[in-house]
Amino acid sequence: MASMTRRSFSTLAAAALCPVAGWPQGQEAALLTRAIPSSGERIPAVGLGTAIVFDNDDAKTREAATQILRTLLEQGGRLVDTASAYADAELVLGHAMPAAASRERFFVATKLESPDAAELERSQTRLATRRLDLLQLHNVRDPAQSLARFREWKTQGVCRYVGITSTSRRAYEAVESVLRREKPDFVQIDYSIDNREAEERILPAAAEVGAGVLTALPFGRARLFRAVRGKPLPDWSTAFAQSWAQFFLKYLLGDERVTAVIPGTSDPAHMADNLGALRGRLPDAAERRRMVAFVQSL
């Protein structure tokens, strides 16, 4: 198993989780869920990001999205994260979600560039839903930005949770400021095993104010897969990870402050592979340090 590529492992995973000695098997196995701090509601800790992968609203993309969403649900996930700025992603999801399952089965998160009612209306129309689970202010840059309008929408029942996002280290000071002042339900931040600044700056602030954490870019824009291409998993890691994707995702989930990881994919087999991180144990603190050292040695 350790010598398998992501492609060969995930082809098996798309049909069923690969039997591994000592691992829980099948849908009856316990799935990793995390509580949203502001409510206690539990959600599966692996979801789907949609930046770039669903840019084009065509028949091929809609079909791929439908299959990916079905896989998401079949393997225990619920969370789908998108944005008004992600080209046609909202539109693709608006067609794919009802083709895959009922709207109620998904935890739908989207992002607005500003507290603009017209932009919100556009997102609702494209997603074919009036009620959002999470509505986020995208790409926070200004430490004075307010979530007052987002909280009004929450009070009105437009969304159940509000949040802020950034995938730029240069914006971390602004994110920290808005996070501590506005106390949103969620913060979404770039975080991967080779990009760990969020551990020192954003995760502590989120814990302080009781905000859930979504991790964008958990594979570092695919640079992590490039770094390990052709390499087997370390023997010591196969006790908790059965693929490189699970290795990278479980590093993040080993921090209990992380509510969910949201890797993007356009491949149902890769979706199944990612969702394998919901099963089996997580690395402990010593193992996480060893994982970092391993990645730094590549």
Image (cartoon, helix red, strand yellow):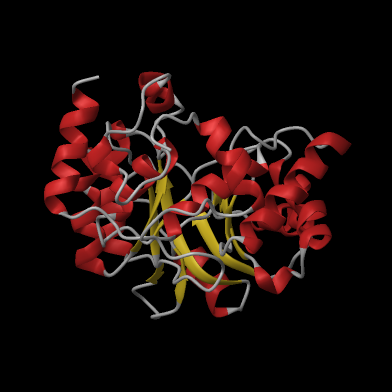
Query: Which residue is farthest right?
Result: 59
The residue shown at (35%, 42%) is: 247
Give x and y (percent) for residue 55. Answer: 70, 33
Apparent side of residue 63 relative to residue 245 in the rendered image (left or right) = right
Query: Which residue is farthest front?
Result: 21
Give x and y (percent) for residue 162. Answer: 47, 65
The residue shown at (56%, 62%) is: 77
Q: Quadrant of the N terminus?
A: top left
Q: Is residue 216 visible?
A: yes
Place residue 187 in its image quadrant.
bottom left
Q: Nearer the viewer, residue 97 or 123?
A: 97
Apparent side of residue 210 relative to residue 42 in the rendered image (left or right) = left
Q: Which of 76 and 57 is in front in this view?
A: 76
Q: Is residue 152 above or below residue 64?
A: below
Q: Quadrant of the C terminus?
A: top left
Q: Is residue 109 above or below residue 59?
A: below
Q: In this view, does 132 lie above or below 253?
A: below
Q: Can residue 137 be seen in this view?
A: no
Q: Is residue 297 above or below residue 86?
A: above
Total count of labels:
0
The residue shown at (21%, 57%) is: 205
Give x and y (percent) for residue 151. Answer: 48, 70
Give x and y (percent) for residue 204. Answer: 18, 56
